[in-house]
Amino acid sequence: MKKISPLSILAFFLLNLSCTSEKPRSLFDFALNNLPEFSLISEKFYFQEVINPMLIKQKGDFLVLMEIYRIPPEKPLIHIIRKNNLSYYSAKGVTGFGPNEIANAELFDPGFDENTFWIYSSRSKRMAEFSLLDTNRLSISEFRQPEDMYMIYNMFYTKDTTFLGISANDPHKLIEVDSKGKWINGYGTWEKIPERSDLDDYLLGELNKGWFRANDAKTIFVKASIFRDRIEIFDYQTKEFVIVDGPRLELPKFEISGSGANSALIFNPNEPYGHRDVAFGDSYIYDLYGGYNEMQIRQTNVIAKTIFVLTAKGEMVAKLNLDRSVRSISVDESLGKIYGITTDEDPGIAVFDIPKELLKK
């Protein structure tokens, strides 16, 4: 009988140990999870009417671009672009606090009328409805938040004509109110962090602050955190959350400044930002991810070059590596296109083809 040397046994043990230790830490370990990655090449389209766009969303046959509010006040805050030939269609949004004006364009709500859309202005605390059929820059109707809704800083209309939104200093991740601000329900509560018992509801909300988005049907809502690497998917029909943590599983470094009602989180400037935007296709959720800190962004103008593709159940599908940096995205799976706002000196729209492997026949 052939003897096995102790060195051979040790080598076999170490090999086995290294193999078994190669387990995925999260859904974002694409190689270990045998999930595909694709490299996408874009084509850029420039529009001279657009100055400094921050968000890109869509409504029917049109793309809707929203400017940062720090543009000349006489310039429009919203631009409508035809999808079929990517040509300029119309301008919307008069900057101001007067009737049918908006102070900024922070959140896009597709609404439920095929010919209109809504824009939420956090600075003027109102939602403004705009028509796709006219050339008037003023909104055609508006909803001003009553005093009881003042703490809500992001919200969507629901099919029940209530509002689902995020409120500061609330134990719930999302709250639902009626048009008078009367509380209807709260969904999800902030998970306490054992090693940071000093974080109250307000500070937990700051730690998890991010982008709030909804699909056209208002059945799925997503909040993707910019400081912490966390995606929270809320099913409005079942009232259940799915939480996806990653790619980074550790918390960002931060300190607490002030105390009581004046407390705030101060994040280490060397910490990279996490998720940058979310878009919806008919089949998947598209999560734009950054991974660059403030210094890197200022030096390179690169904000995000990665898109994670997920299901509404939080299952990872694929990773898309972009050839250029974008700051916001919109997706049309019927056309097989991803649209992104570029972050170069002359920002425009970058158009990417969705890999055919992700398009359902």
Image: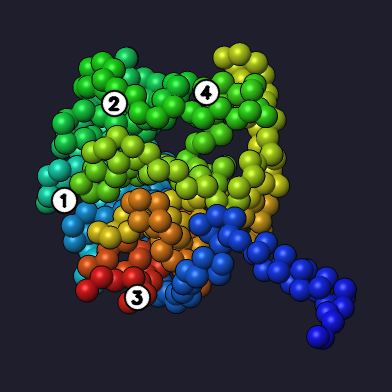
Q: Which numbered disc flags the more N-terminal residue, 4 or 2?
A: 2
Residue located beneath label 4 in the image: 202
Residue located beneath label 3 in the image: 357
Residue located beneath label 2 in the image: 176
Q: In the shown orientation, is residue 1 left or right of residue 89?
A: right
Marks 3, 2: nearer the viewer: 3
Element class at badge 2: strand
Identity, as a three-letter code, of the amino acid under mark 4: Tyr
Viewer-closest of 321 and 179: 321
Element class at badge 4: helix
Identity, as a three-letter code, of the amino acid under mark 1: Leu
Viewer-closest of 267 and 317: 317
In the figure, residue 103 lies in which quadrant? Answer: top left
**Residue 274 spot, x, y in % from top left:** 55, 49
**Residue 28 spot, x, y in % from top left:** 53, 59
Q: Residue at x 25, y 59 (%)?
A: 282
Q: Residue at x 40, y 21 (%)?
A: 151
Point out the image quarter for the N terminus: bottom right
Q: Which numbered disc flags the more N-terminal residue, 1 or 3?
A: 1
Marks 3 and 2 sit apart, C-alpha to C-alpha, by: 38 Å
Q: In the shown orientation, is residue 217 left or right of residue 50?
A: left
Marks 1 and 3 sit apart, C-alpha to C-alpha, by: 34 Å
Q: In the shown orientation, is residue 298 left or right of residue 59?
A: right
**Residue 145 spot, x, y in % from top left:** 29, 22
Q: Give the answer, above or below, for where 181 lies relative to 38.
A: above
In the figure, residue 253 lies in which quadrant? Answer: top right
Q: Give the answer, above or below, for where 336 lies relative to 277.
A: below
Q: Is residue 263 visible?
A: yes
